[in-house]
Amino acid sequence: QVQLVESGGGLVQPGGSLRLSCAASGTIFSINTMAWYRQAPGKQRDLVASITSGGSTQYVDSVKGRFTISRDNSKNTVYLQMDSLKPEDTAVYYCGIVVAGFWSWGQGTQVTVSS
């Protein structure tokens, strides 16, 4: 069993920053891909950024240059540094990890960008 606990969401003004964290616990020998997805009201859940066990990253075009994904393998934790936030970044953000070929998901954290 794998449990994910997310933190760091909240309300921020346009142009501001937030840092999301997601800590994994449970029966974990190694984590392959770690990722952040987001889901805005009335829309599907989409990939924001991902990072492999080797440190390779990928980002959706709309966040390139503004968001940075990173991981601390010693803590089984993935981070998402979000800078220059825009109102269109407003969504529930979910972390997901792949362990032994299976995805596990966090409960989601709300990010609202508004003046």
Image (cartoon, rainbow, N blue to C red):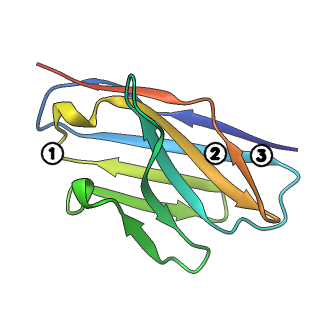
Which residue is pictured at 57% across the width and 81% down the height? 54
Q: Residues within 10 Å of mark 1 (few under 14, many from 20)?
A: some
Report the mark closest to the observer, 2 or 1: 1
31 left or right of 37? right
Dot 2 amino acid type:
Ala
Cβ–Cβ under 8 Å for marks 2 and 3? yes
Q: Residues within 10 Å of mark 2 (few under 14, many from 20)?
A: some
Q: Circle 3: is it few (<14), some (14-19), or many (20+) Cα within 10 Å?
A: few
Q: Which mark is residue 25?
A: 3
Q: Quadrant of residue 57?
A: bottom left
- N-terminal-most mark, 2 or 1: 2
Q: From the image, tell me which residue sits under label 1.
A: 84
Instruction: Work out how far the residue at label 3 is from the one at label 1, CA to CA, in angstroms.
Output: 31 Å
Tell me the SS state at disc 2.
strand
Q: Which residue is mark 2?
A: 23
Residue 33 located left or right of residue 3 = left
Of residue 51 and residue 102, the one placed in the foreground of this image is: 102
Say the numbered circle drawn on residue 7.
none
Task: Give coordinates of residue 25: x percent, y percent.
Answer: 77, 46
Which quarter shows the C terminus?
top left
Query: Looking at the picture, which amino acid does disc 1 mark?
Result: Ser
- Which amino acid type is marked by label 3? Ser
Q: Marks 2 and 1, Cα distance to the nearest angstrom?
A: 24 Å
